[in-house]
């Protein structure tokens, strides 16, 4: 055997090892990648990455372990799933990015973004201690880790003033079996996620108001705990399945479907349910959470449930929003769930537009409705998140939208925060209020500013409320 042949053989063995390891851990067939480049073309973070997703996959196929695991690419991945749903070979690329991050840390490679690792570890520490995440505790611990105890103090004060930070969070970890097993059967339980009692309190308030106005009875899932959000799947695959699975198991015991408002929670619950279709995964996770899992719980997004009531909203609206130009912003997580269909369209959804029309306003056509706002980076890298938000806001302005409407608490906060921050940095006037869809629907149904907490956003919504007029359809 010549030296070159021996070298070739070594390379083949090495490449098979790395490829097998990554495929076994992620369950994704990276070998299928044929370098079509679609993942790189749609990736919003590609300019920060040393290797584009497809370059990284080529290196995996070649077995270049060191180059792959020391790359910064997976640290700069914002988990928007754009690549995963566009790959013609059905590779969940975002999930492979998670696998690479996990392997890289396990093998002792220095993280390219140490603050990202720190943030995720602190987040998971909060979940471990309390079952749910208090945003105030999370930020305080993260600031201490960075040795900047007063970082974002002005923002914190502003959020407290607007009643969007919870000083004494509700804890979610029940004692074994407490509460949930003794409950009667429920048709639909609501999974609020951690933000709805804190930075997204206006969402919870307007949601409660709209349910009551429409006569819909929904109860909170008893003993729910955090779904793990980005932090769990960024660092630990099984934890990322176990945390949502625990909530699915509670709903299963109650014989109830699950209504979810937060797009991040919705995405984690749906992804987990899909993963649990694999019998080995289901068995492993079921053992970890010590509860049976049958995969039958229906997970519904808030937009689906509200859409079922669109004809009533249209008929019973008592305030005219005529002429109000609304840009519907879905963000990246609600519609792009790999291998899960169900939303009306991944790239061009229209469910929210139909609700806006039912509420009497005008939905503008615009191209950024599923772009990623970089919410998972708003703490880790303010600069990146501001840049991503600015592009979306600029597009909304160019399309002459009066208001942005979303169903995701992270998107709402991020786009609101970005305008507030930019106005403090360079005096740019914040121009586009960002409302929750339930606030817009509530406004049309006659809710007051107070009912819907319309004055609690960082960008004021006066220019909307002063335009709404009673219609002839008064109750
Ligand atoms: S989209 Fe899929 S097949 Fe195409 S380059 Fe990316 S990973 Fe490979
Ligand atoms: S998930 Fe989004 S950020 Fe990550 S590689 Fe794919 S497209 Fe890029
Ligand atoms: S993703 Fe959902 S449950 Fe999880 S931290 Fe956010 S709000 Fe909490």
Image (cartoon, rainbow, N blue to C red):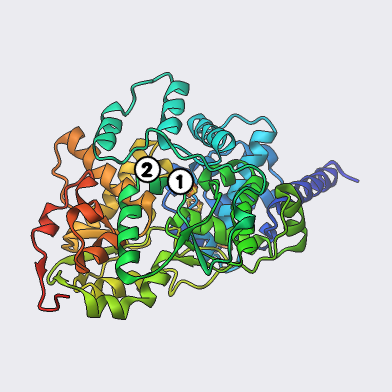
**Which residue is disc 2 drawn over?**
198
Vertical placement of residue 381 versus 343, above or below: above
- Quick check: 199 above or below 38? above
Residue 101: percent from left, percent from top:
61, 41
Q: Position of residue 145 (x, y in %)?
A: 47, 22
Residue 322 located left or right of residue 61? left
- Is 18 located above or below residue 474 in the figure? above
Q: Are marks 1 and 2 in contact (CB under 8 Å)?
A: yes
Rendered location of residue 318, percent (x, y): 16, 72
Q: Residue at x 42, y 37 (%)?
A: 135
Q: Nearer the viewer, residue 259 or 460?
A: 259
* Element class at badge 2: loop
Is 336 displayed left or right of 88 in the figure?
left
Residue 137 visible in the picture = yes
Picture residue at 73% right of the left edge, 57% below the top: 281
Of residue 273 and residue 117, the one placed in the foreground of this image is 273
Instruction: Read off the residue under disc 1.
Output: 194
| Element under disc 1 | helix
Quadrant location of the C terminus in the rendered image: bottom left
Establish whether ligand 3 lies closer than 8 Å to the Cβ of label 1: yes
Give x and y (percent) for residue 175.
63, 42
């Amino acid at each position: 055997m010549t030296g070159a042949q021996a070298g070739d053989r070594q390379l083949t063995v090495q490449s098979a090892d790395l490829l097998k390891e990554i495929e076994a851990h992620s369950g994704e067939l990276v070998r299928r990648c044929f370098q079509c480049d679609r993942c790189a073309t749609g990736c919003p973070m590609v300019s920060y990455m040393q290797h584009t997703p497809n370059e990284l996959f080529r290196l995996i196929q070649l077995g270049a372990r060191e180059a792959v695991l020391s790359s910064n690419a997976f640290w700069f991945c914002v988990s928007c799933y754009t690549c995963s749903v566009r790959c013609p070979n059905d590779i969940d690329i975002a999930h492979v990015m998670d696998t690479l991050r996990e392997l890289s840390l396990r093998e002792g490679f220095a993280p390219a973004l140490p603050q990202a690792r720190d943030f995720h570890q602190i987040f998971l520490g909060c979940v471990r201690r309390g079952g749910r995440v208090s945003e105030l505790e999370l930020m305080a611990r993260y600031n201490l880790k960075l040795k900047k105890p007063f970082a974002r103090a002005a923002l914190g004060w502003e959020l407290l003033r607007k009643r969007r930070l919870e000083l004494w969070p509700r804890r979610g970890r029940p004692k074994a079996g407490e509460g949930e097993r003794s409950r009667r059967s429920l048709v639909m339980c609501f999974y609020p996620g951690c933000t709805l009692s804190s930075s997204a309190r206006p969402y919870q308030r307007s949601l409660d108001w709209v349910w009551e106005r429409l006569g819909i009875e929904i109860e909170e899932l008893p003993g729910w705990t955090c779904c793990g959000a980005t932090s769990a799947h960024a660092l630990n695959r099984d934890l990322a399945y176990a945390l949502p699975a625990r909530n699915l198991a509670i709903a299963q015991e109650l014989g109830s479907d699950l209504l979810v408002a937060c797009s991040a929670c919705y995405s984690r619950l749906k992804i987990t349910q899909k993963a649990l279709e694999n019998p080995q995964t289901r068995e492993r996770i079921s053992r970890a959470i010590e509860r049976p899992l049958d995969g039958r719980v229906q997970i519904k997004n808030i937009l689906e449930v509200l859409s079922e009531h669109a004809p009533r909203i249209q008929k019973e609206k008592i305030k005219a929003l005529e002429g109000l130009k609304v840009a519907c912003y879905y963000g990246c997580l609600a519609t792009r769930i790999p291998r899960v269909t169900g939303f009306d369209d991944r790239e061009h959804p229209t469910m929210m537009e139909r609700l806006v029309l039912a509420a009497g306003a005008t939905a503008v056509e615009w191209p950024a409705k599923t772009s990623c706002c970089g919410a998972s980076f708003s703490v880790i890298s303010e600069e990146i998140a501001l840049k991503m938000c600015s592009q979306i806001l600029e597009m909304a302005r160019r399309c002459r939208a009066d208001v942005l409407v979303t169903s995701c608490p992270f998107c709402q906060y991020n786009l609101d925060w970005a305008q507030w921050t930019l106005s403090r940095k360079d005096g740019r006037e914040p121009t586009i209020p960002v409302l929750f869809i339930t606030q817009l629907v509530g406004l049309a149904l006659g809710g007051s500013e107070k009912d819907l907490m319309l004055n609690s956003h960082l960008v004021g919504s006066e220019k909307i409320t002063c335009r709404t007029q009673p219609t002839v359809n008064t109750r």
